[in-house]
Amino acid sequence: MSTKRELIKTRQNEEGLLKIQFYARKMFNKAESDGNIAWIMCFLSALAILIPSSAGLFTQTIIPIICDVLALVASLFQANHISKAADHRAYFDSYVLDIEYNHYTINDRRRIHEEAEECCRKYADECTIQIKNTGFDDPPGVKDWYELSGECADKDVQLECQSQNAWWDERLLKTRILILIVVSVLIIIGAFLIKTSFGSGVSLRIILSSAIIVKAVERIIQEWKYLKLSHKIDGAVSVMGNGATIENIQELQKLINERRRCNVVGMNIIHKFRAKSLSNIYR
């Protein structure tokens, strides 16, 4: 009879599950692109204040409106792609780690697999590379998603995988926060330069652009929610370090799934750059 460790090692590399992981990664990457587009549109809307009056009132009005609408559409697409990615990651963990898998109906399972298959057909070459590569390869893939140490008891192997999720997210979160701080400083410098060139009135109107404010507040709220859930997850992992119950594992998984649904995405270029080094550190 297979142990839970052997079951996880086998299940995570089933072709259908690898395709589900590829689908999830693709959706998260799409969400990142959507978010970037939304931010660009917000900044363009703000910079529309620099359009000269000679361009006419219609041009001065319509351009920021178009940019704001495009920013809204991109944000809606981002939320939708994050939701789809989170659904597939939750299903992957449920099946691979054997956590409440029976809660999925036959129709749910069929839908998730069909969506993954369709995505892999659409991006066949990329999918082929991803499902063959591990985190140590270039580009990093989705094979051997969970690396099990073999040191913990078989009854705690689910917690080990959940701890690995927490460990990776903590490292990538720190990188993302650092980048956000750098970008914020650059924006402040840019606002100062605009103030110097065009006057304080123009600079203030750009900073107070409604689209930028809404997007910034949304991002702060989601980052704060993500951070709170991360602290809860870290606390739960620490508490269960001496042994986990089925109920503890299920509650921890709910927190992990909830965090994945936060409207916050990582940066694919950072993941590609750091995947191998982080994989080596974790090993």
Image: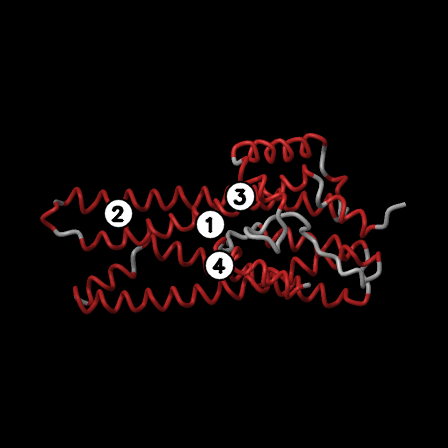
**With 74 as the anchor, is 91 left or right in this view?**
right
Against 93, residue 273 (above or below) is below
Against 173, residue 105 (above or below) is above
Determine whether label 1 and label 4 are within 8 Å by CB.
no
- Counting from the top left corner in percent of width and height, residue 37 is at 38, 48
**Tag on residue 221?**
4
The mark nearer the N terminus, 3 or 4, is 3
Q: Nearer the viewer, mark 1 or mark 2?
A: 1
The mark nearer the N terminus, 1 or 2, is 1
Amino acid of disc 2 = Pro
The mark nearer the N terminus, 4 or 2, is 2
Disc 3 element: helix
For the C terminus, the image quarter is: bottom right
Disc 4 element: helix
Mark 2 = which residue? 64
Mark 3 = which residue? 26
- Counting from the top left corner in percent of width and height, residue 24 is at 58, 44
Crowding around mark 2 (Cα neighbors within 10 Å: few <14, some 14 to 19, many 20+) is many
Mark 1 = which residue? 32
**With 142 as the anchor, is 45 left or right in this view?**
left
Structural distance between the alpha carbons of marks 3 and 4 = 25 Å
Question: Which of the pair 18/56 is nearer the observer?
Answer: 18
For the N terminus, the image quarter is: top right
Determine whether label 1 and label 2 are within 8 Å by CB.
no
Q: Nearer the viewer, mark 1 or mark 4?
A: 1
Amino acid of disc 1 = Glu
Amino acid of disc 4 = Ile
Crowding around mark 1 (Cα neighbors within 10 Å: few <14, some 14 to 19, many 20+) is many
Q: Nearer the viewer, mark 3 or mark 2?
A: 3
- Counting from the top left corner in percent of width and height, residue 93 is at 70, 47
